[in-house]
C-alpha cells in the first residue's frame, strides 16, 4: 500500500508500508500526539516472516566485509543524525535530552562494534591428536546463524536496545523482525530506513509496530522464526512457556541493590546512587532501588543522598538542565504513586520527593520500607529508592541476594577482598565496584539470573546466543 500523508509507515523487508490501521504516539510530557504510525496487519506479519525465512540462506551467506560495511554505514548515519535522533527519543519516551544524546552515541557505537565483531567472529581450531585415534585429524569449530530472529524491545531505550537486537543479528547473518514498544516506535523506524539504505538484502530487517494480543502471539509462535529475543517485563516468561521448543532470550529487569560499606566515599556514593536511581525517572532495568548502608555511615550517607536528590532538576525533558523526566504515561505514574503510598501505609518514611506533576514524580528517598511491599521486592520502574542499614557484611550480602531478581549489584568499597567476595557471592549477572548497579557497559555480557532472565546482551554475547556451533573434522587422506 502506498505511503501517504503524515502517517509514519512501518518497514517490511526493506520497503515502507502503510497499514489499514494507525495509532497515535503521545508525548509523555505533554500528552499530545506527536506522530501517527501505521500498524502491521496479520497479512503484513505473515509476509514479513515469509521474507525473512526465504532470505535466510542469502543473509547468512553474506561475506563478513559486506555485513561490516553495512553496519559501519548505519553507525556513521546515526552519528550524522545524532541531534535529530536525540530529539525523537526525547519526544516519544520523555527521556531528558541530555540522556537521549548519550543514548544515540551508544547506539552508533553498538553498530560500529558489531561491524568489528562481524569480521572477527571466526571460531577455533581444536587438536584431535590428543588421542591416538585422532592422529592425522584436525578439528575446526565455527558458529553459524541459527535462523531468523524476532526481537521485542521496550520503551525505555528506543535506540540502544534496538541496536542491541538489530546490530548483532546483522553481524551474525540472521534476518530479524523487530517489534518495537508501541510507546516508542519512531526511533526504530528510522533505524529501519538507515538499514534499507545499505547494500544488505531487503529482508534483513523488518520493523513492525504490532499491538499486544493475538497478532503478537501469532508472531511469537510462528515456527519459521526459531529465536525470540525479548527485553521487557515478566511477560517474557509467558513467551518462553508458550514456545518451549524455541530459543528464547530474556532480559527482564530487576530491583538492583547497592551496598555502601563503611570505607566508602560517602559524597561520591550518594551522587552515584542518586543518578542511578533517578536519571531516567527510574525507568531502567538496573535502576538503583535498594541501598544497604553500613550503620557507621548511615546518617551521613542518608543526608548526602537527600541533598543530591532534592537538587535534581525535574520538568521539561527538552530542557538541557533537566535530569529527571516524566514517567512514560499516566498509567505508569499512577502505579508508582500507588506503590509509594502502599509503602508509607506499611510504615515507610518519605525523606524527600514523591510529589506528582502530570506524569512526573519527584525523586523519592524512603527509609523503613517493609520488605514485603512492592516497592521493595518488585521492580518499581520509577524514581524511588529505599534505604536500609546493616551492621555485618554477611547480612548485607544475604539481604541483597534475598530477591527473585539478579541482574546487577553495586558495592562501594576500597577493599579488594570485599570486591572479590562480592563477585563470588552476589547472585547477579554483573557486580560493579565503586559505582551504582545502574552502570552498564555495552561491550560486556549483560543479563541476569533468577527472574531477571536468561541469555546475554552485548554484541558479541548476543551473536553467540543467535548462533550454533558446527564442528568440522579434517582428516589426512
Image (tube, grey):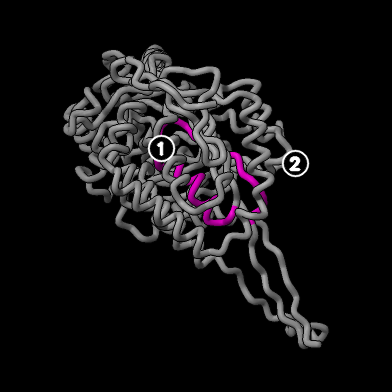
- The answer to which of 218 and 436 lies nearer the viewer is 218
Q: Which mark is residue 267?
A: none
Q: Position of residue 385 (x, y in %)?
A: 34, 29
- What residue lies at 44% left-to-right and 30% top-to-bottom? 185
* Neighbour tally class for label 1: few under 14, some 14-19, many 20 plus, Cα within 10 Å: some
SS at circle 1? helix
* First in sequence: mark 1 vs mark 2: 1
Q: Nearer the viewer, mark 1 or mark 2?
A: 1
- The answer to which of 229 and 370 lies nearer the viewer is 229
- The answer to which of 279 and 208 lies nearer the viewer is 208
- What residue lies at 71% left-to-right and 76% top-to-bottom? 139
Note whether 436 is above or below 473 in the view shown.
above
Note whether 132 is above or below 82 in the view shown.
below
Q: Quadrant of the C terminus?
A: bottom right
Tell whether label 2 touches label 1 (CB within 8 Å).
no
Q: Rounded to the nearest whole Å, what is the CA distance between mark 1 and mark 2?
A: 33 Å
Query: For mark 1, what is the residue?
Result: 190
Q: Position of residue 449 (x, y in %)?
A: 56, 44
SS at circle 2? loop
Q: Is residue 458 magenta?
A: no
- What residue lies at 53% left-to-right and 40% top-to-bottom? 251
- Quarter of image, res 60: bottom right
Q: Which mark is residue 245?
A: 2
Q: Position of residue 410 (x, y in %)?
A: 38, 46
Q: Position of residue 199 (x, y in %)?
A: 49, 53
Note whether 30 is above or below 67 in the view shown.
above
Residue 187 makes an appearance in the image? yes
Q: Which residues are magenta?
A: 145-173
Q: Is residue 156 magenta?
A: yes
Amino acid at each position: 500500500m502506498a505511503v501517504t500523508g503524515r502517517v509514519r509507515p512501518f518497514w517490511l523487508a526493506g520497503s515502507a508500508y502503510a497499514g489499514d490501521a494507525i495509532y497515535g504516539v503521545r508525548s509523555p510530557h505533554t500528552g499530545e500526539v506527536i506522530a501517527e504510525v501505521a500498524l502491521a496487519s496479520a497479512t503484513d506479519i505473515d509476509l514479513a516472516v515469509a521474507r525473512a525465512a526465504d532470505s535466510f540462506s542469502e543473509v547468512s551467506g553474506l561475506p563478513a566485509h559486506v555485513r561490516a560495511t553495512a553496519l559501519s554505514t548505519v553507525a556513521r548515519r546515526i552519528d550524522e543524525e545524532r541531534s535529530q535522533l536525540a530529539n525523537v527519543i526525547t519526544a516519544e519516551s520523555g527521556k531528558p535530552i541530555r540522556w537521549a544524546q548519550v543514548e544515540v552515541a551508544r547506539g552508533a557505537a553498538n553498530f560500529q562494534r558489531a561491524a568489528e565483531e562481524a569480521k572477527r567472529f571466526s571460531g577455533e581450531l581444536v587438536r584431535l591428536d590428543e588421542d591416538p585415534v585422532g592422529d592425522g585429524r584436525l578439528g575446526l569449530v565455527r558458529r553459524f546463524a541459527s535462523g531468523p530472529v524476532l526481537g521485542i524491545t521496550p520503551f525505555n531505550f528506543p535506540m540502544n536496545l534496538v541496536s542491541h537486537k538489530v546490530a548483532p543479528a546483522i553481524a551474525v547473518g540472521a534476518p530479524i523482525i523487530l517489534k518495537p514498544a508501541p510507546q516508542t516506535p519512531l526511533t526504530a523506524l528510522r533505524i529501519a530506513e538507515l538499514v534499507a539504505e545499505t547494500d544488505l538484502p531487503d529482508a534483513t530487517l523488518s520493523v513492525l509496530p504490532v499491538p499486544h494480543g493475538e497478532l503478537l502471539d501469532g508472531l511469537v509462535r510462528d515456527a519459521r522464526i526459531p529465536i525470540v529475543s525479548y527485553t521487557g517485563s515478566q511477560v517474557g516468561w509467558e513467551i518462553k512457556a508458550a514456545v518451549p521448543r524455541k530459543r528464547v532470550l530474556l532480559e527482564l529487569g530487576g530491583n538492583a541493590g547497592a551496598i555502601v560499606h563503611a570505607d566508602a566515599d560517602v559524597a561520591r556514593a550518594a551522587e552515584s546512587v542518586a543518578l542511578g536511581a533517578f536519571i531516567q525517572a527510574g525507568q531502567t532495568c538496573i535502576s538503583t532501588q535498594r541501598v544497604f548502608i553500613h550503620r557507621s555511615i548511615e546518617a551521613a550517607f542518608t543526608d548526602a543522598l537527600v541533598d543530591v536528590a532534592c537538587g535534581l532538576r525535574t520538568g521539561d525533558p527538552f530542557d538541557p538542565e533537566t535530569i529527571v523526566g516524566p514517567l512514560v504515561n499516566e498509567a505508569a505514574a499512577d502505579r508508582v504513586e500507588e506503590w509509594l503510598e502502599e509503602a508509607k501505609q506499611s510504615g515507610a518514611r518519605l525523606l524527600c520527593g514523591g510529589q506528582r506533576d502530570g506524569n512526573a514524580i519527584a525523586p523519592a528517598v524512603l527509609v523503613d520500607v517493609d520488605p514485603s511491599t512492592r516497592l521493595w521486592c518488585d521492580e518499581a520502574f520509577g524514581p524511588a529508592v529505599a534505604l536500609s542499614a546493616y551492621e555485618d557484611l554477611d547480612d548485607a550480602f544475604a539481604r541483597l541476594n534475598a530477591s527473585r531478581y539478579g541482574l546487577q549489584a553495586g558495592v562501594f568499597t576500597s577493599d579488594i577482598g570485599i570486591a572479590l567476595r562480592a563477585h563470588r557471592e552476589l547472585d547477579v549477572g554483573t557486580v560493579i565496584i565503586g559505582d551504582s548497579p545502574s552502570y552498564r557497559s555495552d561491550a560486556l555480557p549483560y543479563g541476569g539470573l533468577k527472574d531477571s532472565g536468561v541469555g546475554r546482551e552485548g554484541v558479541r554475547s548476543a551473536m553467540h546466543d543467535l548462533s550454533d556451533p558446527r564442528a568440522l573434522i579434517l582428516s589426512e587422506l
